[in-house]
Amino acid sequence: MNPIEITSLTLAPEAPEAGQPLVIEVRCRIDARILFELDLALEMYDGEGQRVWFRAAHQDGASANWLPRGEYRWRLTAPEGSLPLGSGRLLATVLFRDGPDARRSNSYARTFANATRGAGLEHARYTLDGDPDPSKLSWRRGHGDWFFRHFDHAAPTAGSYLLKDSELLRGRILDVGCGDGITDLGMFLRYQPERLVGIDPFGGYERLAELAAAEHISMDPWPEGLEFFGADANHLPFEDDSFDVVVSWGSVEHIAGGYLQALREIKRVLRPDGLLFIHPGLFYSNPGSHLGEFSDEPFFHLKKPREELREFILNTPPRRMDRAGHVASNAEYWQWFTELNPITVAGFERELRALEFEPWRVAIRTEDLIEYTPELLSYPMQDLATAELYLSCWNRKRPRPTP
């Protein structure tokens, strides 16, 4: 069964004339939980089956990053209704991804006749609407939105950009420090792995069904193979070589007391030649404080003496950031800051190599300009200028000998 069906294709008017507005409307129904990268293609054929015209929704920014179960309508509106043909056949098809697989919907055709020939479609433009309203989904809201940053940005950044859509993503995946589980949901729905386990000691994932429902993504029934439970990264409750891929987005910097034991545990449960994706927070970077709710001053966490910074955080009302429902207290912000591990790119690379993780793909985002002030003079230029580190590694380890 196709998870999307085009249910109608109409022209209004049915015999377009020059000077008249023309609307080509395609309605479709999605029966799947979610589909990705949807794009409508309209094609026009003459009586001999030769294609004479083509236009896709993405040409007007009317494709969809993803759509949940619902009913949708693409409209191509032209100010003048003349067509390239006086008579012929119009064909509509939706291209989409169902998990990792590229697919096509049913093709819906209709014939037309007695149309005025001309170039009326040259200035036509697509729009997309429906129920749920696509304009209100996270991929339209952008980076200011918490769900977008995890479902629409983090999941494909890890899976596609750094892990290159590896076949290993169809196997067994572990997320160390999964938080609210939104990134895991994004990866699970995109790659449909055999199993994806998210662990975190704080239980934020317990609200995932509620967060997904707010985006019209149904979790009923719960996706088979997607699991969450509380666990400590320093003592992973899994057998050796249990996973094909391990991911960790913005979590190792928060492991109180250091993260080297967590890296050793990750190596242990990751199979030989498995893949690790990791995005550690860099303490000496501008966003490295995780205190952006309190100040826009660059590197303010490095400029203020510790006691002065403590008083500032405890007594300044934060500009509340959407954190998927968790309203943190000032004391929590301060505690989280004091527990941060002071990770740098050079130091982190040395630690990974010492554990025989072999770098595969690396992306570094840097600041445009660092303006030194007296308080910053003791800090290395590279540490201040490197804002974010994303990397994937192969787990090079020899299988344990058979007893």
Image: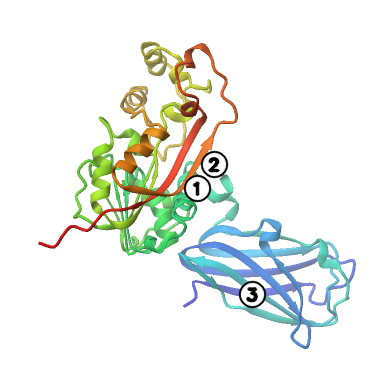
Q: Is residue 371 visible?
A: yes
Q: Residues within 10 Å of mark 2 (few under 14, many from 20)?
A: some
Label 1 amino acid?
A: His
User: What residue lies at 20% left-to-right and 53% top-to-bottom?
Assistant: 238
- In depth, the one of 375 and 326 nearer the eye is 375
Q: Residues within 10 Å of mark 1 (few under 14, many from 20)?
A: some
Tags 2 and 1 touching, CB below 8 Å: yes
Q: Badge 1 is on which residue?
A: 153
- In depth, the one of 298 and 35 nearer the eye is 298
User: What residue lies at 46% left-to-right and 15% top-to-bottom?
Assistant: 303
Which percent across, then down, holds residue 154? 46, 47
219 over 352 or under it: above or below? below
Q: Badge 3 is on which residue?
A: 8
Secondary structure, mark 3, is strand
What sort of colour scheme is used for the picture?
A: rainbow
Q: Give the Cα separation between the discs numbered 2 and 1.
A: 8 Å
Which percent across, then down, holds residue 314? 37, 17
**Which mark is on residue 143?**
2
Q: Give the Cα separation between the discs numbered 1 and 3.
A: 33 Å
Q: Quadrant of residue 291?
A: top left
Label 3 amino acid?
A: Ser
2 or 1: mark nearer the eye: 1
- In depth, the one of 139 and 285 nearer the eye is 285
Secondary structure, mark 2, is loop
278 over 271 or under it: above or below? above
Tags 1 and 3 touching, CB below 8 Å: no
Lower sequence index among marks 3 and 2: 3
1 or 3: mark nearer the eye: 1
